[in-house]
Amino acid sequence: MSTDLRYDPHDGTPVHVVASRQGRPNLPDDSCPFCVGGREAPEPYDVTWFTNRWPAMPDERCEVVLYTSDHDASLATLGANGIARVIDLWAERTTTLGSRDDVDYVLVFENRGPEVGATIAHPHGQIYAYDHVPPRPARRLAVWTPDTDPGDRHVVTVGEWSAVVPHAPVYPVALDIAPTTHIADLASCSTDQRAALAVLLADVMDRLDRLFDQPLPYMMWLNQRPTTTHGWDDAWLSIEIVSPWRSAGVARYIAAAEVAAEEYFNPVDPAELAGRLRALARGPQ
């Protein structure tokens, strides 16, 4: 593939020019490549991964993770056991990719819904393995620790994991999920810690899908310790989930002034969002 990493000469923003991705095929209307028997899943599976045929970076740095063979499922419907299998695979791929000499950072992420650019409805996420630590995770991991006193922005806690609405979110729907004790990456999580994270994710995803009484389009990504040989011992694992919806089916678009100034105007009160999510609990918390 042809890729060209460039940097804006004025502010240093990295941009991958990937002209080859213009040739990606459109998804056929009558088939799904991720369903069993499809192009990417010829054999039955519970959770699996494969190298992306249309990568954003070369050298097998881009992977697709299939959460389940059930086309109509989602993280919200997989339950804790299904999500635990996904977490285990995320951790395994992070370790494997991170062991490469040419990989400094492993990004696990998901785009869910056409509103945020997902072209295939089958439940899946992706993994990018960078040969450097990208600017945003570098800034966040250098200083970020969990919000220990979120007050009315707290949503739910399971074991060592808490979900809170950030103090100053850019998106109208936003959640930070993090351990309350220091964990740097998924690979460092114990079996019990992964199980508790799976329970919390199942709970949170269920609430998000009931927030507007329909499946919520969202972006989710993991911030975890870079895989460089030295440094980053203080990096704190976290998961961010954001959605552009400010109400059912109504997107909050990022305006020109916001992009230009890098100052954002969020119409949703973080505490109000957290209160609505707390109210969606299915049982005692």
Image (tube, grey):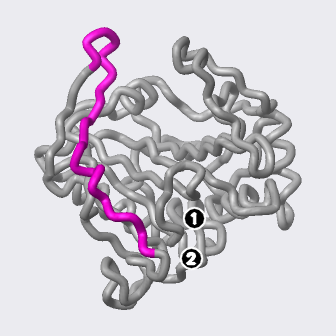
SS at badge 1? helix
- Residue 61 image position (x, y, % from top left): 22, 53
Residue positioned most to the top? 10
Residue beneath label 1, please?
A: 198
Viewer-proximal residue among 123 and 153 = 123
Of 227 and 76, the residue lying toward us: 76
Q: Are marks 1 and 2 in contact (CB under 8 Å)?
A: yes
The range drawn in magenta is: 8-28
From the top left corner, tell me how far across and down residue 9 is, in percent: 25, 12
Does residue 15 appear in the picture of this structure?
Answer: yes
In the displayed structure, would residue 201 be above or below residue 233?
A: below
Residue at image coords 81%, 30%: 269
In this orientation, which residue lies closer to the viewer: 272 or 34? 34
Q: Which secondary structure, mark 2?
A: helix
Q: Position of residue 274 (x, y in %)?
A: 79, 42
Q: Is residue 230 above or below residue 87?
A: above
Q: Quadrant of residue 13?
A: top left
* Residue 115 drawn above or below residue 265: below
Q: Picture coordinates of residue 111 (x, y %)? A: 50, 54
Q: Residue at 70% across / 51% down in the picture?
A: 157
The residue where tag 2 is placed is 81
Give the residue drawn at x 36%, y 75%. Answer: 48
Amino acid tagged 2: Asn
Residue 273 part of the magenta-drawn span: no
In the picture, measured across the screen, residue 67 lies left or right of residue 176, that is left
> How many numbered tags mark residues here?
2
Residue nearer the viewer, 101 or 151? 101
